[in-house]
Image: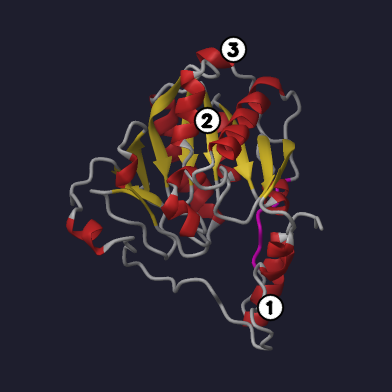
Amino acid sequence: MGLIAREVEGRGIATVSLSSALSITASVNPPRGVYTDYPLGRTAGKPHDPASQDAIVRAAIDVLATASTPGTIRELDLHWSENDAWKDGVMRPQGGGEKAEDDRAERTDVPQYQFDADREAVDPACPTCFVP
Amino acid sequence: MRQPPVDYIARTREQYSALGHPVYKWVKNEDTPPFVKPKGEPSSWRVGLVASGGIYAVGQPAFHFKDDTSFRAIASDIDRGDLRVTHFAYDLTDARNDPNVVLPLDPLQRLAAAGGIGEVGPSAYTFMGGIYSSRKVRDQLAPAIADRLVSDEVDVALMVPV
């Protein structure tokens, strides 16, 4: 996403990139960032929790309004849970087994629908789809 | 007890090594990123939204898991019940429970209602991250999304990876 942020910024539109992966964001080095120390997949807050969601979006807008240094990453004082034990198992073999297993889904070029009914509802012309 | 941020680059290296995959070459930009100051006050801004969490709307084809560089426009006033999420690499539980955690349309609308921004752009742009080829992202996807944001005349853009 940082690569896209750089392209968009280069067209004259200021960007801010949310992040829950500080090392990756720092490496890609987008124009501005807001870091929240949550597990991946909740970059914009906790589910059905307007307090965390609003805090993150407000911080992002504030960084856009105030940051004057390219590459600024603001780290928010938000935590996922009472302790950080969730970090122990991230991308590490579970259950104490010795053999690592790939927990990601298989790479296939078949569309992966959330519900089977979504497949039936598709408009094949899809005017809102873009293939660059 | 608090721990430092998860170092995903190091853990990816460990995981790929354990799986027998070659080392993934993360993008590393050491130059100064482009940087423009937004014009006017936040209360006047039209805010664009780009998200890589694999969000699609009912009526659109879902993403596939093999370097899918396509993207979707989703109307920012969409019925939230028509949002769907698919992705190969992260726990989708919370995103499917409340898509705002990867596509913060409601927080942006609330901020607009409170006067903290002017308005939300007409469309959010979504794709499925985890595209292995950074070249395809840089050369194909990024310019195409930038074209849309320019066309929508947004003042600033919020980028939401997972």
Q: CA distance from mark 3 to mark 2?
A: 14 Å
Q: How is the image coloured?
A: secondary structure
Residue at image mark 2: B157
Residue at image mark 3: B41
Q: Which residues are magenta?
A: B24-29
Q: Foreground mark, 3 or 2?
A: 3
At label 1, the amino acid type is Ser
Q: Is residue A6 visible to the viewer in this orientation of the structure? A: no
Q: Mark 2 — on which chain does it sit?
A: B
At label 3, the amino acid type is Glu
Q: Is residue A99 left or right of residue B95?
A: right
Across and down, in percent, residue B85 comes to: 40, 54
Residue displayed at 64% across by 67% down: B24
Q: Is residue A105 above or below residue A33?
A: below
Q: Mark 3 — on which chain does it sit?
A: B
Q: Is residue B48 left or right of residue A100?
A: left
Q: Foreground mark, 1 or 3?
A: 3
Find out whether residue B74 is within the magenta segment: no
Camera-nearest residue between B156 and A99:
A99
Q: Is residue A71 left or right of residue B88?
A: right
| SS label for mark 1 | helix
Q: Is residue B123 visible to the viewer in this orientation of the structure? A: yes
Asked if marks 3 and 2 fall on the same chain, the answer is: yes
| Other residues around mark 1 within 10 Å, as few (<14) / some (14–19) / many (≥20) | some
| Other residues around mark 3 within 10 Å, as few (<14) / some (14–19) / many (≥20) | few
